[in-house]
Image (tube, rainbow, N blue to C red):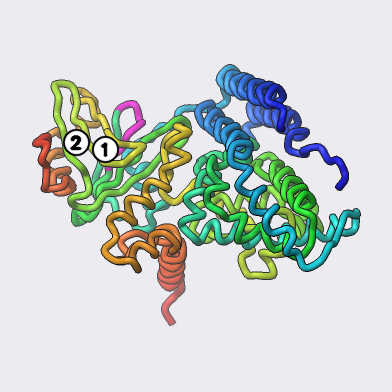
Amino acid sequence: MDDPLILAVVLGGSTLAIFAVYLLNRLIGGWDAARLSDWSHAARLLDEDLMGFRAETGFVTQDGRIALVFERDGARLGIVVARGDVFVLRSFGPGDLKGLKQTSRALIILTGDWALAKIVLPLHDDGVASFGLEALERRLQPFVASADPGGQNA
Amino acid sequence: MPDIPDPILIAIPVFVALIVAEMIYARTTGRARYEPGDTLASLLMGLGNVVSKVALGFIAVAWFTLIEPYALFDIGWGWGVFALCFVLDDFVYYFAHRFAHTVRWWWADHVVHHSSQHYNLTTALRQPWISPMTLKFIFFGSWLVLMGFPPAMVALAGAINLIYQFWIHTEVIHKTPAWFEAIMNTPSHHRVHHATNPQYLDKNYAGVFIIWDKMFGTFQPELAQEPCRYGIVKNLGSDNPFLISFHEWWGMIKDMAGAKSLREALGFWLGPPGWTPDGSRETSKMIKARWAQRQEAAKKVSEPAE
């Protein structure tokens, strides 16, 4: 591939082919957005992936795309987030979260994770409401890092 | 030296055609999964890999040009010689791949290929962008050249090896004939390699011939009762090609920068992925040991008391 023209044709053609394949994938479908049926579904996934995650309580948002699961004895917080047609799991120990932020519309968990930096929980969400906002904040507090120079902890 | 066209360039249109065929087959039968974001990310990683090979390939070329005069023999070209070169190259590939999973410096590069939670033909093309910078070719690519195989022949064997590995990234093919499963790397064997189930971790490193795993104790057949869960132990959750490409590098640099001693820094650099001085994260060995303990405990509970 020493000839720049050939190189340009190969790269240009490849780029077009990539977007054509992507569009085809979008057009024909065949995949469903991942949804959690309830928080015990999330607990099962956490136990399977983290081996020995002993879920105590939790909730799933009404769209089934986010679940928070608290482990017994407050040992770990498990978060399950749907991304496309798969679930991404994280667990946090006490002090692992960067912070909590509350706006008029949502409670935002700042995880410090690259891909899941913010977990946005709408305040009007049925799942959040069923767990109780106060209870949720109380449960989350031990997982938030104590040093909080930004002062954004709830 | 015979005039040989680049086999990967010839293979690219075939790759695209097979991906489209598998995608349509997946849609009609449900026997494979394609999700647009994941598909796009994998294909862009593949394109970036080709670009990086063009841009950074000179590093490897310079190295092999440098060491070629020191070859023990002048083996020359021939079909028999090429067959031997291909088998030996696959043998070296096995160890290169094994080290890519057990040394973080090389895992930071190779993790890209494992970062999808899907397993389809596009996963084969999800390849790293800065491989030549890891200098893995010096440690694993030099042996055959120093033995006397022409560098172009070694490169051709390596390219055909990679082309072979394309078709094994599929869920569509369940099992191939028993004799083939016994000798060759197959979709079933390679699904195990891409799975994060504890009993599947660090298994089936083979490129073309599965016999190396059987010889060196890393073979694991796919079990019907244990469906593969694809991805990495801590899944990325992003289709951003830059995040896919550099997340582990950044993590490694951060860990090394925070190391309290040279020993710790070396551990973060050359130790197994997940290694920490205090054991606060888990290596795959630790995960497997914990899994084995759990299995043992479950067995004791299910066995009737004597």
Q: Amino acid at mark 2?
A: Phe
Residue A21: give x, y in percent of width and height. 62, 23
Is residue A128 left or right of A88 when viewed as pictured?
A: left
User: Mark 2 — on which chain does it sit?
Assistant: A
Q: Which mark is on residue B156?
A: none
Q: Crowdedness of circle 2 by 10 Å Cα count: few (<14), some, many (20+)?
A: some
Instruction: Tell whether position A69 is magenta.
Output: no
- Residue at 34% across, 59% down: B281
Instruction: Tell whether position A65 is magenta.
Output: yes
Q: Residue furthest bottom?
A: B306
Disc 1 element: strand
Bounds of the magenta span?
Answer: A62-68
* Residue to which mark 2 is pinned: A131
- Residue at 42% across, 69% down: B293
Q: Amino acid at mark 1?
A: Phe
Disc 2 element: helix
* Residue to which mark 1 is pinned: A59
Residue B69: give x, y in percent of width and height. 74, 60
Is residue B194 left or right of B280 when viewed as pictured?
A: right
Residue A27: give x, y in percent of width and height. 58, 17
Towards the viewer: B299 or B202: B202
Q: Crowdedness of circle 1 by 10 Å Cα count: few (<14), some, many (20+)?
A: many
> Do we see residue B298 in this rendering?
no
Is residue B194 left or right of A38 when viewed as pictured?
A: right
Quadrant assignment, res B125: top right
Is residue B304 left or right of B7 when viewed as pictured?
A: left
Quadrant assignment, res B3: top right
Placement of B92 over or under B166, stated as above or below: below
